[in-house]
Image: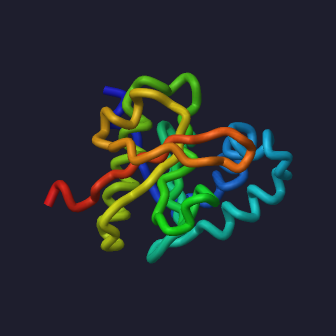
Amino acid sequence: MFIEEVEVVNLLDDIKYLEEVSEWIWEQWSKQHNDKLKDVIYRSKHSLNYEDIPQMYIAKYNDRVIGVVSIWRNDLTARQDLYPWMSTLFVKDEYRNKGVGTLLQKKVIEESKNMKYSNLYLTTDLDNYYEKMGWEFLEKAPLGNGCYTKIYRYNLMKDE
């Protein structure tokens, strides 16, 4: 089965994919804010870590990178008090709806637990996606441009 052949590893273990996943992040989120690709690559380079956050993980299949996810200290200016954050969850189109996003989320949850955090947060405009993995809606928060985003929390202690 396909999903059993997908491997999720710290980007630091396979750094050759850094620019490729940075391009995905830039295309999906940063480009619309007029960020430069080189700035996203710079941030990605400084997310290479094993011991603490920030960290980045990639999903690989047949020696190709097919997805990425990050753990960041902050992903929402309005809520500097909350951390860590799961961010940049992205799966290439042809591998969506096959469980890759779930694998990436499980890795971030596992690593956040290992670092002894109690909760993990994310911000999204998606409906009915993260709830399937046990994320709980926390609140809507301002983005600073008159728009709002949803904040979700994952209780890392609930499974213990």
Instruction: Where is residue 19? Give x, y as percent.
Output: 72, 52
Residue 4, compared with residue 15, is above or below; it is above
Q: Which residue lies furthest to the bottom in this view?
A: 51
Q: Which of 145 and 6 is in front in this view?
A: 145
Q: Give the total of numbered labels.
A: 0
State the residue lying farthest toward the left: 160
Q: Which colour scheme is used?
A: rainbow
Residue that appears at 50% across and 68% down: 81
Q: Is residue 106 left or right of residue 38?
A: left
- Residue 155: percent from the left, percent from the top? 28, 56
Q: In which quarter of the image is the N terminus?
A: top left
Q: Where is residue 100 in the image (x, y as percent from the top left)?
A: 42, 35
Q: Is residue 12 visible?
A: no
- When the figure is inspected, residue 30 is found, relative to residue 61, above or below; the finding is below
Residue drawn at x 70%, y 63% as measured from the top left: 43
**Vertical position of residue 79 compared to residue 91: above or below:** below
Q: Name which residue lies at 54% across and 51% down.
A: 87
Q: Is residue 129 visible?
A: yes
Q: Which quadrant holds the C terminus? A: bottom left
Horizontal side, residue 128 vs residue 134: left or right: right
Taking depth in this image into account, of 77 and 28 the one nearest to the observer is: 77
Q: In which quarter of the image is residue 94?
A: top right
Q: Residue at x 27, y 59 (%)?
A: 156
118 or 103: nearer the eye? 118
Name the foreground residue: 32 vs 115.
Answer: 32
x%, y% of residue 14?
Answer: 56, 58
Query: Please, is residue 60 above or below residue 39 in the view?
Result: above
The single residue placed furthest to the front in the displayed view is 146
